[in-house]
Amino acid sequence: MKYLSALTGLFLLFTMTTAFAEDEPQSRPQYPINTIVAVVNDDVIMSSELDAATRAVTRQLNEKNTPIPDRAVLEKQVLDKLVLESLQLQLATANGITVDDSALNSEIKDLAEQNGVSLTEFRNILERDGYSYQDFREDMRKQLTIMRVRQQMVASQVKVNDQEIDNLLATLKTSGNSGVEYHLGHILIEIPEAASPGEIQATEAIANNTLKRLRDGADFAEVAIAESDSQTALEGGDLGWRTLGQLPAMFLDTVRTMQVGDVSDLIRSSGSFHIIKLLGKRGDERHLVEQTRVRHILIKPDEVNSEEETRIRIEQLELRLRGGEDFATLALANSQDTLSAAKGGDLGWVNQGDTVPEFEEAMNKLEPGEISKPVKTDFGWHLIQVQERRTHDSTEEYERSKVRNLIRAKKYEEELFLWLRRLRDESYVEYRIDQP
């Protein structure tokens, strides 16, 4: 996750609960120290947590130059998010889902590397900017735990079959929009569970008023933060870039006709009213990849043959190849990669990243027809021969893979929303501050 603006953005993405020593928002209410602001099953949320989380979000919004709503409105969104976090962490505890220090350290190390700094530099930058490293670790542990809960409870249940991929590709091709991506803002106004006709009418009035404010020039992100019931509310309703296939079906006809900057009419679903804004649009591109057709001979050390004996054997095979013996014949007779050995060692066309780094590095240095020196990887010792190279248009394979991921992401998002709603509805939550 490579999200830092001087590492600050990344931190705020992972946590809303670390206290900051600066950037106090205006009109901040003065709560007594650590009063309870919400009861969540057997857990409580304290005023200090809400205050710290609200300041964190305020700072994040300031960095994005996003207008900030009234403190009470912002607090409601933040408190709702903290409630959901608490419920998911309680579920993790009940199901034995944890993130140990080893996994946490690995994630933090990866984050540092992705931002081009060492772990020590990463820590120093956080602390220089006023963040407690220990608080960062624990907040990141919470977010990773929540990710694991969602993976186990929701993502693992999402399946995508080939027919769904074929159907969506056909739909995109028919619509002439294959490869086109749309950047959308989204506001969701939720209808109460089991709402009466009067409650539905009142919710629609709120949605229409929200739409009018947008049409009158109100900032979309500010309104989304203040009004939206979506999980993306605190990101200003930003859904990011999506193809038509990743969008809910109810949005498709509307999005197809929108120009950048347009705000939609109200879109009604079974339990909500929606407003979308087209923030951007970009077209399709060909996906060209460099491919290498390669074959190899693999010899592996085992209980009988030591590492040294294996190295000597691969060197002997190298000498035979350089003496003119046929690569395919030697691979068939000697290679311990049984699948490729049956094809004379042929691995077919491989893309960058398909093989382990040591193999790929040696392969990339070879001219077609050239044979490598013995190459050691975790799999054993290899002799590698490049047969040919090409620039391949893998757009079809790429689009198929992308569509699969889009369908999966769409299903996951829909299931996550329903799951979080059920989790909230089936739990005991008591707010102890006034809700706007």
Image (cartoon, helix red, strand yellow):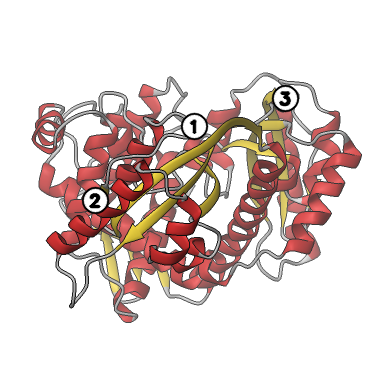
Mark 2 residue type: Glu
Seen in the picture, residue 232 relative to 9 is either above or below; the reply is below
* Residue 382, percent from left and from top: 32, 52
Q: Quadrant of the N terminus?
A: top left
On residue 283, which mark appears?
A: 3
Looking at the image, residue 86 sits to the left or right of residue 220; the answer is left
Q: Say whether disc 1 or disc 3 marks the residue closer to the N-terminus.
A: 3
Residue 151 appears in the figure? yes
State the residue in front, 139 or 388.
Answer: 388
Looking at the image, residue 56 sits to the left or right of residue 406; the answer is left
Disc 3, SS: loop
Q: Say whether disc 2 or disc 3 marks the residue closer to the N-terminus.
A: 3
Q: Are the two marked residues, 1 and 3, in contact with CB atoms closer than 8 angstroms?
A: no
Say which residue label 2 marks. 315
Residue, x 71% and y 20% (percent of image)? Answer: 261
- Total marks placed: 3
Quarter location, residue 162: bottom right
Task: Judge depth for marks 1 and 3 and give the one in front.
Answer: 1
Gap between marks 1 and 2 measured at Cα: 21 Å
Residue, x 51% and y 52% (percent of image)? Answer: 347
